[in-house]
Image: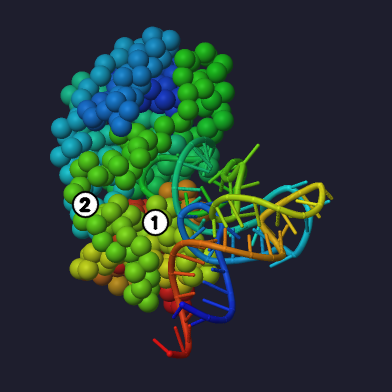
Amino acid sequence: MNSFESFINKDEMIVVGMSGGVDSSVAAYRLKKAGYNVVGIFMKNWEEKDENGVCTSEQDWTDVQAVCEAIDIPYYAVNFAQEYWDKVFTLFLNEYKAGRTPNPDVLCNREIKFKAFLEYAEQLGAKHIATGHFVQRRDIAGKAHLIKGIDPNKDQSYFLYMLKEAQIAKAIFPVGNITKQEVRKIANEIGLPVSTKKDSTGVCFIGERNFKNFLQTYLPSQKGNICSVDGEIVGHHDGLMYYTLGQRRGLGIGGRGDGRSWFVVDKNLKNNELIVAQGEDSDLLYSHVSNAVDITWINEAPMKEGENYHCTAKYRYRQADQEVCISYSNGVLTAISKEPQRAVTPGQSLVLYKDDMCLGGAIISAVQKGTHK
RNA sequence: UGGGGUGUAGCCAAGCGGUAAGGCACGGGACUUUGACUCCCGCACUCGUAGGUUCAAAUCCUGCCACCCCAG
C-alpha cells in the first residue's frame, strides 16, 4: 500500500476539501504535518435553509476557519450551488419523479467534489486535491485504483464508485489508512475545535432533513391507495415518490391481518398504488437477480461482454460484501447474488469489489423478486 | 318491536374480583455522508355511560347509550 506521501512532491500545493468535520480537518492536518503546502477550501453547494430556518453550512464554515487557523493553513470558500443544482439535484428529482430512489451523493462526488472542485483546484495551480473520505488509493502499473478505507466500519468507497481512474489519480485520501477512532484521537491530541463534533449525515451539503417534507417542497404529490399484494386497499399514501422499497415506517397501517408490520415491496406508477406486504420475511422483499445500468468501471472492466465474473458487491452503503456473479451485455449488468438480498431498489447503486478494490458499479434498474434463483 | 351478542389507547387484542399483557401504528433517540432497514425508549391514573354490591370491580348486579346478528 502506498502512503499518501508517495504520490506527491513536498513543494506541491495540495487543496483540501474541508467540510468542517473531523475527517477533513485531520486530513488537512496530516498533510500539513508531513510538510506539504496545504490550502483548505470550503464548499458551499446548497443555499436553502432547513425546516427550522437553520443554515448548518454557516457553522461548518466557521469551523473550517477555526481549524485552518489552528493548523496554520490558508483557507477559502467557494460556491458550487449552481453546479450542484444542475448536475446533481435536477437528476435527483427526475429520478424520484420516475418512481426510483436515487443516491445523490454518488453523483455529487463525480460531478462536484471530483470535478467542479478538482478543476477549481487545478486552476489555483494544484496538481492534487485531498478529501476526508475513508478510502485509499493504490497505484498499480501507473494506474490509480480505489481501495476501501482501513476502517471496515467507515469505508466510504461505496460513494466514490462513479469516479474514473483519472479523477482518483488526482486525489489523495489522508485518513483512508487510519481508523475513525484514530482520527478522533489525533483531533483531540492537537486540540482541534471539531474533535468531538458529531459526524454529519443526510444528503451531502444538504444535511439531515425530514426527508418526506424535504421532497414535498420540490415534488408535487399525488395521493393514492396503498394496496396489499392481493389488491386489497389497506391504506392511503401521500405520493409514490415519498416512499421507497423496503420501507416500513410512515405507512400508517396498523392492526390488520396477523398484526405484523407492513413493508413497501413495489410501486405501481400506472395506477398510482403503493404495494405493500405484511411481515419482514415476505418473499417479495427479497431477490437474487437484479439488473443495473449506467455501468461505471473505474479502470478497465474485469471481464469481456458476455462473460461471467465472480466478485463481491454492496447493494447499499455499509452492507457486508455479498458474493455475486456478474455479467453485462448491451450496457446492462446482471448480478446474481449467492444470498437473498433485501429490498434491492431501482435507482440505488450496486457497487462492485474484488477484495479491497472497488471496481466500479451501476444503477439498479430492475429486480427479479422472490428468493428462488 | 322481540331474542342474542359486543363495547379496553388510532387499529387489533389479553384480562373473567385484587389494583390495565402483547402486537401494529405513532412519537422520540441511537446507528448512518443517499433513501431505507435495524436497535432502544415512550405511548390508557383508565376499561361505552350512570349507579349499585364489595375492604377492593375492566372484571359481579341494574338502568341507559352505541354497534352487530337472528327473528319479524
Res A199 label: none
Picture quadrant of residue A168: top left
Please state the chain letter of the residue tagged with numbered disc 1 in the rendered image.
A
User: Residue B14's quadrant in the figure?
Assistant: bottom right
- Counting other residues with Cα less than 10 Å from the Cα at mark 2, is it few (<14), some (14-19), or many (20 or more)? some
In the rendering, at what x and y percent does residue A143 appear? 33, 44
Residue A346 appears left or right of B46? left
Count of labels in the image: 2
Amino acid at the residue labelled 1: Leu
- Which residue is rendered at x = 39% and y = 47% of the image? A158
Residue appearing at x 28%, y 54% in the figure: A238
> Does residue A30 appear left or right of residue A46 in this picture?
right
Give left or right: position of A120 versus A194.
left
Q: Label 2, secondary structure: give it.
A: loop
Which residue has dot 2 on it?
A221
Give the SS element for disc 1. loop
Is A148 rendered above or below residue A129?
below
Q: Is residue A345 visible?
A: no
Task: Output the chain of dot 2.
Answer: A
> In terms of sequence position, does the residue under pointer 1 or pointer 2 come before the other?
2
Do discs 1 and 2 belong to a common subunit? yes
Q: Residues within 10 Å of mark 1 (few under 14, many from 20)?
A: many
Colour scheme used in the picture? rainbow
Q: x%, y% of residue B25?
A: 45, 54
Horizontal and vertical percent for residue A231? 34, 75
Amino acid type, callout 2 = Ser
Residue occupying image coordinates x 44% and y 77%: A373
Disc 1 designates what residue?
A: A251
Q: Where is residue A234 in the image (x, y as percent from the top left)?
A: 37, 66
